[in-house]
Image (cartoon, helix red, strand yellow):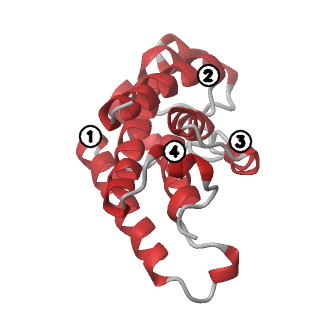
């Protein structure tokens, strides 16, 4: 599959996952993992708390942003055995997450869940409040608004990963064989 198609598949999966399962961080991560054919159950589980920012509070970074950053870190971040000495991996993930950050700022003016909700829906919602939650759903929160953000996050994250793979001369098959390609 061509890189452009892989990124598009990640985007489409992310939107579908967000519409059906919610928890934008986990949906973004799962979509990128599925499009690339690379899975890590522990990392997937750790993304469970990144819905509507963090813990459905809205005041943290967008879960889609976090999920894409987690995918980048999973594939190119430093490993525990090189915790004290791996500037190359840190440079890679920092460069990629800065690029992701810029994409979010261009598209939404912010990386925070609450600000992105305001940008797309005209206001933010307290998803712990049943009335607000119903209003969020009626406004298209999980029908098309958040799925579009998650789709973009997965697209941009996958594009950044594929770009790094290209720089390293890594094929998709090599990425799939190695749990942590930075080793």
Q: Rate crowding at label 2 as few (under 14), some (14 to 19) or many (20 or more) other CA atoms within 10 Å.
A: some
Q: Which residue is mark 4?
A: 173
Whether residue 59 is visible, yes or no, is: no
Would you place residue 77 above or below residue 10 in this image? Answer: below
Q: Which residue is mark 1?
A: 107
Q: Rate crowding at label 1 as few (under 14), some (14 to 19) or many (20 or more) other CA atoms within 10 Å.
A: few
Q: Nearer the viewer, mark 1 or mark 2?
A: 1
Secondary structure category for the residue under label 1: helix
Q: Which residue is mark 2?
A: 133
| Separation of residues labelled 4 and 1 (CA atoms) | 32 Å
> 128 or 39, which is in the foreground?
39
Cβ atoms under marks 4 and 1 closer than 8 Å: no
Whether residue 32 is visible, yes or no, is: yes
Would you place residue 85 above or below residue 103 in this image? Answer: below
Q: Earlier in the sequence, mark 4 or mark 2?
A: 2
In the image, 166: left or right of 40?
left
Pinpoint residue 125: horizontal percent, then vertical percent: 53, 31
Pinpoint residue 113: horizontal percent, then vertical percent: 48, 42
């Amino acid at each position: 599959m061509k890189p452009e198609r892989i990124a598009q598949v990640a985007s489409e999966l992310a939107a579908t996952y967000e519409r059906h399962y919610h928890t934008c961080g986990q949906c973004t991560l799962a979509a990128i993992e599925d499009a690339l054919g690379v899975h890590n159950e522990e990392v997937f589980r750790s993304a469970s708390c990144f819905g509507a920012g963090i813990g459905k509070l809205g005041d943290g970074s967008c879960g889609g942003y976090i999920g894409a950053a987690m995918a980048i870190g999973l594939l190119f971040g430093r490993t525990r055995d090189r915790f004290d000495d791996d500037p190359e991996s840190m440079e890679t993930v920092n460069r990629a997450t800065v690029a992701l950050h810029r994409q979010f700022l261009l598209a939404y003016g912010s990386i925070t869940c609450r600000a992105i909700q305001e940008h797309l829906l005209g206001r933010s919602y307290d998803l712990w409040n049943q009335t607000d939650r119903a209003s969020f759903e009626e406004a298209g929160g999980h029908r098309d608004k958040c799925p579009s953000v998650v789709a973009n996050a997965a697209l941009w994250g996958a594009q950044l990963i594929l770009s790094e793979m290209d720089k390293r001369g890594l094929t998709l098959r090599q990425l799939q064989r190695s749990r942590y390609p930075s080793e």
